[in-house]
Amino acid sequence: MKSTTVSQQSGDNNNSQKVNTSIQILSCRTECKWYLIGVVIRLVWTLIYPQRGYIHPDEFFQGSEVVFDDFFRTNLTRTHEFNPTAPLRSVAILYLLYGLPVSILSWLSSTFHWSTIPFHLKLVFPRAVILCLSLCTDILFSRLIKTLYPKLSSKQHAIILNYYGIAHVTLVFYTRTLSNSFEAFLFLALIYLIDHNVSSLSSFVSSTVNDTKSTTRSDRYLLLSSSFIGFICALGIFNRATFPAFAIVPLIYWFTNILPVINHSFHFQLLLGRTISFIVGTFVATCTLLILFDSYYYNDGFSLMIDWKKSLVVCPFNFIVYNTDASNLDKHGLHPPWLHFIVNATILYGPLHLCVVLWGLSHLANLSQYGQKITGRIAQIFQRRSTPTEQSHQSSSPLLLYLYSVPFVFLSTFPHQEPRFLLPLLFPLTLFIVPLLITHGFHRLVFRLWLAFNISVAILYGHLHQGGVLPALQHVHDFPMLTSGGAPIQENLNKRILVTYHTYMPPGYLVTQMSNSDVVKKFDMSIVDLQGAKREKLDMTIKDIFNRHSTSNTQVFIVLPSTCRTDLIHLKQQKYTFTLSEQFGFHLDLDHAFEEPFHGKHAGTTFQWLQTIWNRYKLDVYQVQRD
């Protein structure tokens, strides 16, 4: 009878636990609905309907372009960052990120004898890697919310996560193959690991001698997190030499929290020594491997063994040397030091950055207290190092404020500034300002502004900005290879030339037909990027192409904005035929959107006026023939 009663009770408990678990899952889904919507958007915009917007050429030319070129030997464009004499970018990082997806595509093309790798797969596979890293970063960010704000409710935790999940930086930039996106992921991982490392050391100080099992287990986690800290710091520096601007505050936080208790006990000193040795050792080992990989890549392996001192390549050092030369920075554009804080941060973070600025103006006294607190903390380290002090519970707001504001100071010292350089700051910004908005009851109003801002900017950068380039490249990539008689005979057509005019640089690996199958006969693909050249340069380029190449086995395409179609009139008068193959819109060039006046006086109705705008902002693909 008793056993029956116990079994019934245990069954009831199990059922109640299942009910409670299902209720928690449903409530979590309801509370985190905007974050979950953001996850779905990221998946769809990356894998199913890839974003057409073109943020910056570095998205392709400092990443997947190089790896595709190495795997398929297509002689693609190499920018100045990969100059073998003084390379600025580590190829080891690129292979670490994109080596596996490109090798999978290479294997598929060989196995299934593809005539060419589909355009969609070439675009999606590298982005899928960044998407996976982004989703892994979400887990760390969610855990960090609970660690920094244990007193907030689960609903309030979900509010912070919703702000992050619906941000256009998360939806667009954190799914693109930008080195700044990878830098952001490493930055959050470093914050999380250092916080975990400090907590483990603090728990050791407060633990009793009898807790041997828990102490041993925490020691293992401590050394493991220490190894990852050194590994992430090395990857961050070789990915972008600006990573120390973001890493300095977490490292100072670790320094100011550990050294006051350095003389706690002999066992603690031994553990702290092992922690530091694991951090430094892993950092040095990782840097050594990255240097050797880059040195072997940029030099002949045999020459590296003969004269390794001259053949060693340290890309972060070359990057710093290059950017200290004002003439080099002048090529990329010089900007005032206030641009990051006033303009670029507003473009990326809009309402939240404005809230931080308003909060700072209204709490100038608090800011001075934060400065005095950190100064006193550092002074305390060197004055009372021999006294074991237990870390008191303090607000995380000062740390998060430093994590957000200090990188502005370092990055603003560089004359060349772009919004994407500030991508890692989304994490400390959200963690700092959103809890304050929740506390003061402003988050509902701000979230509406945040939602409207990010939807519009996500559409702008995700699909409109230079939005015709990728579809135009896909059109040229998939264009049938026809002879003059109209028959699709591949042997009679062995060259294709693409001329781009007043657009961003076209990624060569996307428009070039690639395959590692021995059965497939390939043809030559050439790209002429005229950038923002004048009409005379376009005329000379077309004439030179038809003078050097036979018209019977060459296809020539011109890709240019609809606003520049008048530049073809002079060529049409010289016995060249331009056949409009396709138009792609909406193509918005923010760099030159307002250079030519808009004439809408002939548009009578609102519909005609909108149609005029639609026809204006398109990208045209012409096939060129000589009469």
Image (cartoon, rainbow, N blue to C red):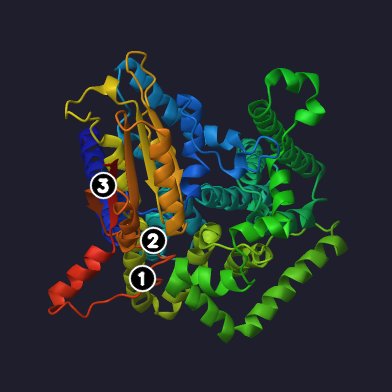
The quadrant of the image that shows the N terminus is top left
Question: What percent of the width, then of the height, locates residue 394?
Answer: 62, 67
Give the vertical position of 380 relative to 60 (above or below).
Answer: below
| Res 577 label | 3
Alpha carbon of mark 1 to alpha carbon of mark 2: how far?
9 Å
- Disc 3 marks a residue whose amino acid type is Thr
**Mark found first going from the N terminus, 1 or 3:** 1
Q: In the depicted view, which residue is nearer to us: 272 or 211?
A: 272
The quadrant of the image that shows the C terminus is top left
Question: What percent of the width, then of the height, locates residue 98?
Answer: 47, 34
- Residue occupying image coordinates x 44% and y 46%: 541
Report crowding for label 3: few under 14, some 14 to 19, many 20 or more residues within 10 A (C-alpha): some
- Disc 1 marks a residue whose amino acid type is Phe
Question: In the figure, is residue 278 to the left or right of 478?
Answer: right
Q: Are marks 1 and 2 in contact (CB under 8 Å)?
A: yes
- Label 2: state its secondary structure: helix
| Res 168 label | 2
| Res 453 label | 1
Farthest-out residue, top? 519
**Mark found first going from the N terminus, 3 or 2:** 2
